Amino acid sequence: MEKQEMNQGEGTNASMGLLGEYLKQKRLDKNFTLEKLSQKTKISVNILKCLEANDYDHLPSAAYIKGFVQSYVKVLGIPQDEAITKMEYTYLNVLGKPFPALNHTKLMSTPSSTQPLAGQKSPTDEAPTPHEVIESGDSIIESTKSILPIIIFGAVILLFVGGYKLISTVVESEVSGQQEKDLGPKIESSSALVKQPEKAPEPPKTEATATPTTPTEATPPAAEAKKEEVKAEPEFPRNFPTVDFKKVRGKLFSVKTDAPENEDTAILPQQIKDSMNSELQNIYIRATEGNTWLSYKIDNNPIESVIINKDSDLFLQGNEIRIFLGNVKVTKIFYNNYLIETPTKSGVKSLIFPEESNAKFQLPLFPKAKDDILYTAEDYIKRMKLEEEELEKRKANQ
């Protein structure tokens, strides 16, 4: 019966259903357990449970949520557009705000160093490069310049026609006004004159009925206004709720200098090895078994959020690099051309390079505020304390 009801609900109003119930029903229809789906998507069971429960408070930022949903529906063969629509609808209903545009999120593609085979399309051909976007923008500007004189000419014609009509209406109104003056005073009909004395006795009736009711009707709105004034003390809206930060303890990773992957150019391309700078931290991440999602910060640059599809990669260099990965088990990560081991139970991982900088930072590295923006731990702590101080002041003044 439950299955029939769910199927009927999807048939009548599929676009309005919540994402979690929709995904769970599709998974059960395909005879997939959460453990089996976790093996296929490389997403932890806990994250899959949160998706099916519409529990966005325990999921990472919107970029990761979208990546989870895309991997989920790809394995089950569900139409992606329908799932994304349900995701945006559910996000709005659960969190009370629209799903962000994710204009800060980049989709990583396979680098040009790995040449495609004959007859195959390069992954970079699927999406326009930044130079192509700029060139297309320039072409649009040039075409706009060619159309601009035509638009100006049309505007001048419209102004001319509008001015002509305006002058003609003014002239017509003045002529009609003179004709009315020549006709002499207007004479009202006898019926209008007869109706006037009938309206005279009506005002005393309304005044008589209004006088006894005015004192009783005037008091309730005043009382209600006082009640509303008492209730009009909104709680202090917090964009930076309290987060329990912890110091980094122990090693976050271990270097494998004798790993066979260090010499495998199919995983660690020679071009990447040659690009290593001994004075900087060199991080190479390759998604070998599935898609991964990560946020990173290099030195004083802003936080970047990235989706790396399977068989694609990302190369980072800097004096100090912080990384938070959402699906680390599907990746191979190299530090200064050596494979590193990143133990984790949940599938997510925080990394800091060099290791000597561990004492400077706290976990989580990039907490998410209520406005769905990622902040560094140190920046979040400052803003969180300011909100807590403001909250204490408001409580003291009450």
Image: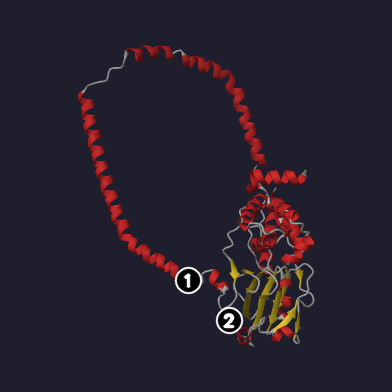
SS under mark 2: loop
Q: Residue at x 75, y 86 (%)?
A: 257
Of 175 and 43, the residue lying toward us: 43
**Where residue 107 sits in the image (x, y, percent)?**
59, 68
Tell me if residue 12 comes above or below residue 275 in the rendering. above
SS under mark 1: helix
User: Which residue is tagged 2?
Assistant: 113
Colour treatment of the image? secondary structure
Residue type of the residue flagged with mark 2: Ser
**Where residue 89 sits in the image (x, y, percent)?**
63, 51
Q: Residue at x 59, y 20 (%)?
A: 213
Q: Is residue 185 visible?
A: yes
Q: Are marks 1 and 2 in contact (CB under 8 Å)?
A: no
User: Which residue is tagged 1?
Assistant: 132
Image quadrant where residue 242 sits: bottom right
Q: Is residue 353 visible?
A: no
Residue type of the residue flagged with mark 1: Glu
The residues bearing labels 1 and 2 have C-alpha atoms spaced at a distance of 19 Å
